[in-house]
């Protein structure tokens, strides 16, 4: 998309740039750019007390303010809620007196999902997705969906290995119109449903995220979008073990994340017993996987009983 | 607080007007009538920001709306994004006016401290979701648009999916210009869904002139005259007082 052609400075701060907040007077040193999206630019920055933070700044006051509202609401939700924790909210005034709202949040260090899966093997899908589904369940239970779930909006952290969601711009109250979405991940685009927020909307996007890993160049819809999508899923050999689960998610047959999570766990248990995943040459970190699963099971029970 | 009704015109075009009144002037008139004019300029494949699209920004800024210049592949996402952004912007304008009445002349959402700004945005978001909307789409069907019309049709059907997911009520009307005999031709009368659009959307373009100004002027009349009042008679009294808080 061609945006207004003037290069907006908040999108290209140089390393070493120093920002001071208008309201709280804290200073932030920009280390590097972590990424940009539709709403703003995110930088790795060091606070005046030496703490590393991710700093998101935007020229779209309305969008970033809505996003901050969501982060504030999520902070009130108990337990592990998806999304980074929110630290500080402030404004930066440039030399011409223009005001750019920004906020700082937890810096989530890791790598992209497709890179991770390429390196470590696709069997990790069976670990990472149920974890995210657990967090989705918590979020859905308090009445929200993630909305804009996509590969650019998640990061795989290393210690512990976890799939974290980082962009809450699409978080929407269940029953309302999905605030922000991306065509490829949107069930409306694929003629698989509407754009009213319900848990199944996120589960569809999760399945699309798997398809996006299988087809790095993505693909566009054809005359019969739904049929085409199912064909693409069938052809994705790397998703084979979980094919029936993604199939159900694409067709909107899961009412909630828990159902999908259960199916994942059953499937993984089955695979572990069979010690399957044959064609895969990559060495398999079974020990690590088993540890991860045990940890998530323990966490799950803790979360359920407390 | 009563939720009002938002009125918008969305102009989709690929070139500069070459006949009749100045579209920028008409856009100004339309804004004064309480209707926002948004414009999407569609580029040809391989074109860079072409000169013929300079007008796009001018019309939108006179019409108090949003503009965006795009390639056909991203038209679908753009149409819904521009429409939503325009709604937010208009509602923000309304809220700003209220703020000025309460807090004095120089107050605007941007000038508030972050916490209060957040509260105000909460209200704006709520209104964006719940307000009723009337959207008149004006499609340029001059000869150069030939190859893009199918994309435009798909984008409009997609727009109705997004808008109809909202809690508020929607009415869409779709017109093309230049018309065969008049400035505009009606493609679809005011209605809530665009399912019928597939069958009635024109496949053929009509001639080489682009009378954007006259088309906009005629579009304004579609809001105030028969068309709307006929289909929305029960809303007639609320027509005047658009945003009563
Ligand atoms: N808390 C964070 N920690 C690390 N990287 C981040 C963080 N937030 C965002 N990023 C990076 O910045 C990019 C853009 O951020 P995002 O919040 O998705 O912006 P937008 O809302 O504009 O899409 C992301 O794709 C990611 O790579
Ligand atoms: Mg993003």
Image (cartoon, helix red, strand yellow):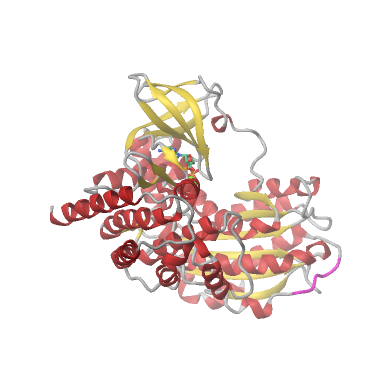
The residue depicted at 51 percent of the width and 38 percent of the height is A35
Number of numbered markers: 0
The magenta segment is B203-207
- Inspect this view and state whether residue B4 appears: no
Q: Is residue B206 magenta?
A: yes
Dominant SS type (magenta):
loop
- Would you place residue A125 above or below residue B54 in this image? below
Q: Residue furthest right?
A: B208
- Tell me where residue B12 appears, x and y as whole percent: 69, 59
Q: Is residue B42 located in the magenta-colored stretch of the structure?
A: no
Q: Is residue B155 left or right of residue B41?
A: left
Q: Position of residue B190 (x, y in %)?
A: 58, 74
Q: Nearer the viewer, residue A208 or B211?
A: A208
Is any part of residue A112 visible from this angle?
yes
**Residue A291, image x and y in percent?**
27, 49
For the residue pair B153 and B67, the one nearer the viewer reads as: B153
- Where residue B216 appears, x then y in whole percent? 70, 60
Q: Quadrant of residue B152?
A: bottom right
**Viewer-side residue, B210 vs B197:** B197
**Can you say whether A188 is above or below A70 in the image?**
below
Horizontally, is B106 left or right of A257 in the view? right
């Amino acid at each position: 998309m061609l945006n207004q052609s003037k290069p907006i400075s908040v999108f290209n701060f140089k390393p070493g740039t120093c920002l001071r907040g208008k309201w709280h007077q804290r200073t932030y040193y920009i280390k590097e750019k972590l990424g940009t999206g539709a709403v703003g630019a995110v930088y790795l920055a060091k606070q005046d007390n030496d703490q590393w933070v991710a700093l998101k700044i935007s020229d779209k006051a309305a969008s970033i303010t809505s996003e901050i509202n969501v982060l504030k609401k999520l902070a009130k939700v108990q337990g592990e809620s998806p999304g980074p924790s929110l630290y500080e909210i402030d404004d930066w005034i440039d030399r011409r007196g223009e005001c750019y709202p920004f906020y700082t949040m937890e810096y989530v260090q890791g790598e992209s999902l497709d890179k991770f899966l390429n390196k470590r093997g696709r069997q990790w899908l069976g670990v990472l997705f149920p974890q995210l589904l657990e967090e989705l369940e918590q979020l859905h239970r308090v009445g929200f969906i993630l909305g804009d779930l996509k590969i650019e909006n998640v990061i795989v952290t290393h210690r512990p290995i976890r799939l974290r969601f980082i962009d809450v711009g699409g978080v929407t109250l269940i029953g309302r119109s999905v605030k922000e979405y991306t065509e490829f991940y949107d069930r409306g685009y694929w003629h698989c449903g509407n754009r009213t927020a319900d848990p199944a909307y996120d589960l569809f996007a999760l399945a699309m995220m798997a398809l996006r890993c299988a087809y790095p160049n993505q693909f566009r819809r054809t005359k019969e979008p739904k049929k085409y999508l199912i064909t693409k899923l069938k052809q994705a050999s790397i998703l084979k073990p979980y094919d029936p689960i993604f199939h159900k998610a694409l067709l909107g047959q899961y009412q909630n994340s828990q159902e999908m999570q259960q199916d994942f766990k059953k499937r993984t248990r089955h695979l572990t017993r069979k010690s399957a995943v044959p064609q895969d040459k990559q060495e398999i970190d079974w020990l690590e996987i088993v540890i991860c699963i045990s940890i998530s099971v323990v966490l799950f029970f803790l979360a359920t009983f407390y | 607080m009563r939720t009002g009704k938002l009125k918008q015109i969305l102009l989709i075009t690929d070139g500069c007007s070459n006949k009749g009144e100045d579209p920028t002037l008409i856009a100004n008139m339309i804004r004064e009538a309480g209707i926002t004019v948004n414009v999407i300029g569609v580029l040809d494949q391989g074109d860079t920001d072409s000169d013929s699209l300079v007008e796009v920004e001018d019309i939108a800024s006179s019409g108090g709306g949003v503009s965006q210049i795009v390639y056909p592949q991203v038209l679908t996402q753009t149409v819904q994004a521009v429409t939503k952004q325009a709604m937010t912007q208009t509602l923000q304008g309304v809220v700003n006016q209220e703020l000025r009445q309460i807090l004095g002349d120089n107050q605007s959402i941007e000038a508030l401290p972050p916490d209060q700004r957040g509260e105000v945005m909460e209200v704006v978001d709520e209104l964006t979701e719940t307000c009723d909307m009337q959207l008149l789409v004006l499609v340029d069907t001059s000869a150069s648009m030939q190859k893009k019309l199918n994309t435009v049709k798909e984008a409009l059907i997609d727009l109705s999916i997004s808008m109809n997911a909202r809690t508020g009520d929607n009415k869409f009307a779709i017109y093309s210009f230049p018309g065969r005999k008049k400035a505009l031709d009606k493609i679809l009368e005011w209605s809530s869904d665009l399912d019928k659009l597939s069958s009635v959307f024109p496949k053929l373009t009509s001639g080489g002139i682009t009378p954007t100004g006259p088309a906009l002027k005629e579009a304004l009349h579609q809001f105030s005259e028969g068309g709307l009042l006929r289909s929305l008679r029960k809303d007639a009294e609320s027509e005047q007082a658009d945003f009563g808080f």
